[in-house]
Image: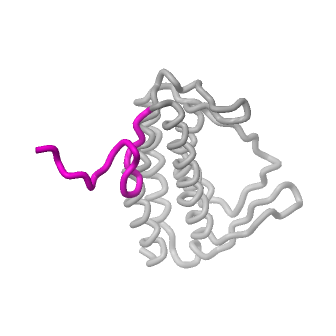
């Protein structure tokens, strides 16, 4: 495996448990809740977080994407079990995509456009770094805020949260 792909895989493996903890906390009876009319619902955002790595794995198999040819929409969650199954499949897909990269494919240009207008060009590794990881973390953080607004105990992501402290001494 390419060293750069291996480094992304190590990071993915380190971040996956925290992301799973956040997704597991989204209450199924609040999937339709949204903090603002312009915001995604909690279920849509949770499903988006669950599916980002898998979507990026599919994008990485292509040479680019013309946004003028796709409709952007967000699926909601059917159930907690379906959400977690989506998450597990999505993580497996990006792991497989990273494992299958050779030097040429990893460094080949990947383009995002809107019709004739080029929006950006990245290497496939750049696409995976930016969209499968950084984009994932961004929306995971957004989902943590949803949990707080829903008065759901926030799990540990890094260090401690106001609700969980892995550094606290056990009660005697």
Q: Does 18 appear in magenta?
A: no
Residue situated in front as seen by the camera: 85 or 13: 13
Q: Give residue 106's position: percent from left, percent from top.
A: 57, 73
Up-down relation of residue 132 to residue 6 (above or below): above
User: Image quadrant for the N terminus?
Assistant: bottom left
Residue extent of the magenta highlight:
152-172
Residue at (51, 30) in percent of width and height: 150
Q: Extreme left residue here?
A: 172
166 relative to 58 in the view: left or right: left
Magenta stretch, main secondary structure, is loop
* Res. 32 image quadrant: top right
Residue situated in front as seen by the camera: 37 or 163: 163
Q: Give residue 172's position: percent from left, percent from top.
A: 10, 44
Up-down relation of residue 13 to residue 170 (above or below): below
Residue at (42, 71) in percent of width and height: 6
Q: Extreme top residue here?
A: 29
* Res. 126 image quadrant: bottom right
Residue at (64, 72) in percent of width and height: 123
Residue at (83, 55) in percent of width and height: 114
Q: Give residue 140's position: percent from left, percent from top.
A: 52, 48
Q: Does 168 appear in magenta?
A: yes
């Amino acid at each position: 495996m390419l060293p750069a792909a291996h480094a992304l895989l190590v990071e993915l493996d380190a971040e996956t448990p925290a992301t799973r903890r956040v997704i597991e906390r989204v209450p199924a009876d609040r999937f339709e809740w949204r903090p603002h009319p312009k915001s995604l619902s909690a279920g849509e955002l949770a499903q988006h977080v669950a599916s980002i790595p898998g979507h990026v794995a599919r994008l990485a198999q292509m040479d680019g994407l013309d946004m003028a040819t796709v409709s952007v929409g967000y699926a909601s969650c059917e159930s907690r079990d379906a959400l977690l199954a989506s998450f597990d499949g999505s993580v497996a897909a990006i792991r497989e995509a990273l494992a299958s990269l050779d030097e040429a494919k990893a460094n080949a240009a990947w383009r995002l456009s809107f019709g004739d207008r080029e929006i950006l060009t990245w290497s496939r590794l750049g696409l995976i770094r930016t969209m499968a990881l950084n984009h994932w973390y961004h929306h995971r953080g957004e989902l943590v805020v949803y949990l707080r607004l829903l008065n759901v105990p926030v799990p540990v992501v890094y260090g401690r949260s106001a609700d969980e402290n892995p550094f606290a001494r056990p009660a005697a």
